[in-house]
Image: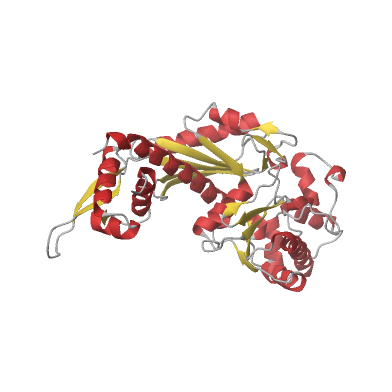
Amino acid sequence: MVPVDTSDRAVLAALLDSVPLTRPELAGLTSLSRPTISDVVRRLVGAGLIVDAGVRRGRPGRVPTYYQLAPTAGYVVGLDIGGDNTRVAVADLSGAVCFEHRQATGASGAVRIAAQAARMVARAAAKVGGTLGPMRRVGVSAPGAIHADGRTMSLARNLGEDGPFDLLTPLEARIAAPIVLDNNVNLAALGERWRGHARDVDTFAFLAVGAGIGMGLVHDGQLVRGAHGAAGEVAYLPLPGSVPPGQRAGHGKEQLADEAGGYGVLAALKARPTWPGTRPSTVAELFDQAAAGVTAAREIVEAEARQLGLTIASACAVFDPELVVLGGGVGRNPLLLPTVREMVESLVPFPPRVEISALGEAGSLTGAVFVALQAARDEILQITSQAAPQAG
């Protein structure tokens, strides 16, 4: 006999990922017997997780009943906390996003950032009201290394925190749902595997280039975290021209000027004593000028692309990914791609495919929704398994 939780999981997964299905269709998709399907359907209906979706007429023979996920089975919230912007999204248990909102990150420091994030989650919950059932999980993406306790973070200069700090506790004090916290680049990698270029790839890397730079590593479908949660912190690679962290000037975001990222690009721009025409004031303006053929702008963009190519090549020597996805506000610019590919091809014995993220700026938020969704699904399967002895 198939264990209850396994059969429930199989049926629920089929209904989460498909249109409404009949019992015979569920049996065909899950390879479970029809009596088992009947028992599982009864349990899931009793738990309020699936509902009778009516019948579909027009076919010969017995009119079948269709089942679908209950609209009130619950929902999850994804939260992406960045140094410049914070984004929130609500999704039902099928993964369909029904509400999104973003606003500038208005403060620095764990407590103040947590307060703003909690207000955004509350607003999102108010928007969906009671139409989707309970809020089951909140997935939180934040820039920094997550320690083994899942609570302590380090290296979050983008949030105004340099040393170890706790972001989860102030979030839990304000949000009435279990929270899953992870690094933003790791979650961007999971988002890419869920709904991007890496859907059919088991071993790949996601290189996020925004204000700074970081890499998410996925091997055999699982995140590689390392002993201290710092796997993929490629800003610390001792590449030519890189500045040791202890010698970086300034504090917080200012230290990012010595990384291959947005602040580093702006520092290179500022270091140019002269500029032909109007000097760009943002990374976007710099890329616009490079696309228009301004030589000075193209030189800075080419230098950035070469540094990214070296970063990828260094990671490939250790990790050997099948695919590398470029993301982040800087990394997903198509002007970088030709030189990055050329560098990787010239330096790596088995060069991976290099692509720009299919998810754009939504990568980390998509990953936050994904981990919240996985945790919520696990929770409801435990509920049905516990209810199984009373069923049928």
Report the side of 31 relative to 163 (left or right).
left
Report the side of 382 relative to 111 (left or right).
left
Q: In which quarter of the image is residue 361?
A: bottom right
Q: For the C terminus, which image quadrant?
A: top left
Please report the residue visible at 49 percent of the width from the left and 58 percent of the height from the top: 195
Residue 353 placement (x, y as % from top left): 63, 69
Q: Quadrant of residue 250?
A: top right
Q: Which of 143 and 5 is in front in this view?
A: 5
Please report the residue visible at 27 percent of the width from the left and 46 percent of the height from the top: 41
Please report the residue visible at 34 percent of the width from the left and 51 percent of the height from the top: 11
Residue 296 placement (x, y as % from top left): 79, 66
Please report the residue visible at 58 percent of the width from the left and 57 percent of the height from the top: 220
State the count of labels: 0
Residue 109 seen in the current view: no
Q: Which of 131 and 41 is in front in this view?
A: 41
Residue 314 seen in the current view: yes
Above or below, 366 relative to 149: below
